[in-house]
Amino acid sequence: MKNIIKSDWILIFSIIFLIIVLFLKIYFPNKKIQPFGMTILKVSSDSMKPVLKKGDYILIRKQNNYEVGDIITYIIEENCLVTHRIIEKYENVFITKGDNNNVKDSKEITIEKILGKLVFCFRKGDEYI
């Protein structure tokens, strides 16, 4: 019985924390909010549909290693981020593709350009993923 109560408190705390962080991100969109080393971003296209939709909020976190199948966010140029799935991996170079795109991305991504891996998605007005 104690484990159930303890897990309920953890769930409640996690939900409250997520709501506070999302509130801060929505009302202060230009502020860099990184709870526990995670970055909160808003999806701006449907290139990863149906997994991620335009308007979703995602949490990403820097990892030591990335694998084929991971959804990552990376920098392609200053102030331009892309969130796509790794489809090929060669040492520390990755080939990515949006799930809703017909062709793979034209640029190879080095590990230094990766900001993090998708940890959680919050779909506004819908369900959690």
Image: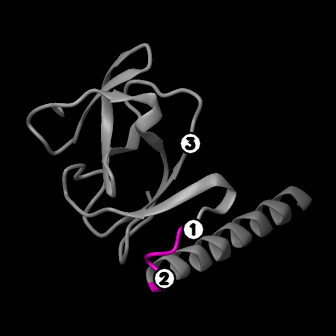
Magenta span includes 125? no
Q: Amino acid at mark 1?
A: Ile
**Contact between labelled residues 2 and 1, with CB atoms less than 8 Å apart:** yes
- Outermost residue, right direction? 2
Q: Which scheme is used to colour this image of the protein?
A: one colour
Q: Reply above or below: 20 against 53.
A: below
Element type where label 1 sits in the image: loop
Q: Reply above or below: 68 against 18.
A: above
- Tell me if mark 1 has few (under 14), some (14-19) or many (20+) residues whose alpha carbon lies within 10 angstroms of its own: some
Q: Position of residue 79 (x, y in %)?
A: 33, 58
Q: Position of residue 52 (x, y in %)?
A: 30, 55
In the image, taking residue 63 as reference, residue 108 lies left or right, namely: left
> Would you identify the image quadrant in which residue 30 lies?
bottom left
Depth check: 121 or 11 in front? 121
Depth check: 79 or 88 in front? 79
Mark pair 2, 3: CA separation: 22 Å
Q: Position of residue 124 (x, y in %)?
A: 37, 74
Mark pair 1, 3: CA separation: 14 Å
Query: On the image, numbered disc 2 is attached to which residue?
Result: 28
Query: On the image, numbered disc 1 is attached to which residue?
Result: 33
| Comes first in the chain, label 1 or label 2 | 2
Give the magenta part as a residue range: 27-32
Query: On the image, numbered disc 3 is attached to which residue?
Result: 62
The residue at the point 40 percent across, 41 percent down is 72
- Tell me if mark 2 has few (under 14), some (14-19) or many (20+) residues whose alpha carbon lies within 10 angstroms of its own: few
Mark pair 1, 2: CA separation: 9 Å
**Contact between labelled residues 3 and 2, with CB atoms less than 8 Å apart:** no
